[in-house]
Amino acid sequence: MKSMTGYGSAVVKARLGTLSIEIKAVNQRFHECQIRLPHSLLTIEDSIRKEIKKHVARGKIDVFVKIEDQLKTPRKLRVDIELLEQYIEAVKTIENAMGQKLTSSLDVNALLIHSDIAVVEKAGNEQWIDEEETIFLALTQAIDSFNQMREKEGQYLLIDMQNSLKDLGKCCDQVEILAPLIIEQYREKIETRLRDYLNEVEVDESRLLTEIGLFADKADISEELVRLRAHIKQFEHYCYTDEAVGRRLDFVVQEMNREANTIGSKATAMSIRQQVVEMKGFIEKLKEQVQNIE
């Protein structure tokens, strides 16, 4: 079991310099990955995204890749003259359409900053993109560090959820003990009222049993308790699988809450309703923790 939140990093020294990768993730229902790369590594962005997807099923993930060159490789500025001429021609077209010269002249600095017009390139053949094996080695190390933190946090979440499941099971035990007593108490209550009302007249035992049977059928919560216990076992089973189970656990918690609500609506005794309140409190704790599970 892994938490969705985590952090991992790796630093690798290569022939061209130092490469550092950071991975951060926070809770999110679906998978979303944003990668920030130096311009020279944009061609391997999809490969990095696919590698992240193999290890992270859901969450909002940010990946930062930084390089620090050690080799003083010569650089050159490449200017796209054809595109620059089109910008200049566009300014002239605007001025002719307006019938006046623009207040500010063409800003050459602004045009050169434009990444499509002016690009700084290394003059030599020494490029980081040629160090793809080193880059993915650093990525693997960062993912391992990232997953270690997520697994550790996942263990803490698992312990907390196990405690909530145990408490929820205890509530089920108490309700199972109380449910038959409630029916017996109802029988005694009906007999007492009938005797007080009829005085010396003998109570019709068959009619009394029919009334009690109707009440018992209406207040029967045995099926709900069976399903609730089944959901608890299913939840425990998912907790020990290696797959991403966050969504499955979220669904199971919803079913637990539905069964608890049904028990509460059927219960007429305050003692059972108090146990239902306790149940819903533990289920709510499970729901909050499940939001952190991958």
Image (tube, grey):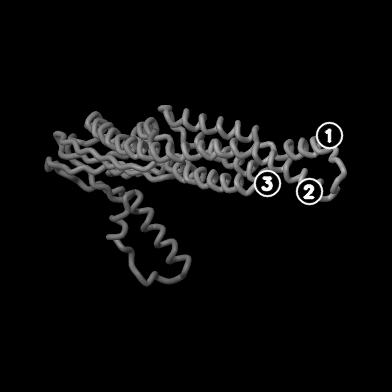
Q: Position of residue 95 (x, y in %)?
A: 42, 66
Say which residue appears at 47% left-offset and 69% top-offset.
98
Specify the label residue 206 is tagged with: 1
Q: CA distance from mark 3 to mark 1?
A: 24 Å
Instruction: Bin the neighbour count of mark 1 within 10 Å (Cα to Cα): few under 14, some 14-19, many 20 and up.
Output: few
Judging depth in this view, the residue of 202 and 1 nearest the camera is: 202
Looking at the rendered image, the quarter that the N terminus falls into is top left
Q: Amino acid at mark 2?
A: Arg
Q: Amino acid at mark 1?
A: Ser
Q: Residue furthest front?
A: 200
In the rendered picture of this protein, how many numbered marks are placed on residues?
3
Q: Amino acid at mark 3?
A: Thr
Say which residue appears at 14% left-offset and 34% top-offset.
15
Judging depth in this view, the residue of 247 and 86 nearest the camera is: 247
Mark 3 or 1, closer to the camera: 1
Mark 3 or 2, closer to the camera: 2
Q: Tell whether label 1 touches label 2 (CB within 8 Å).
A: no
Q: Position of residue 149 (x, y in %)?
A: 30, 38
Residue under pointer 3: 268
Q: Is residue 144 above or below residue 121?
A: above
Residue under pointer 2: 193
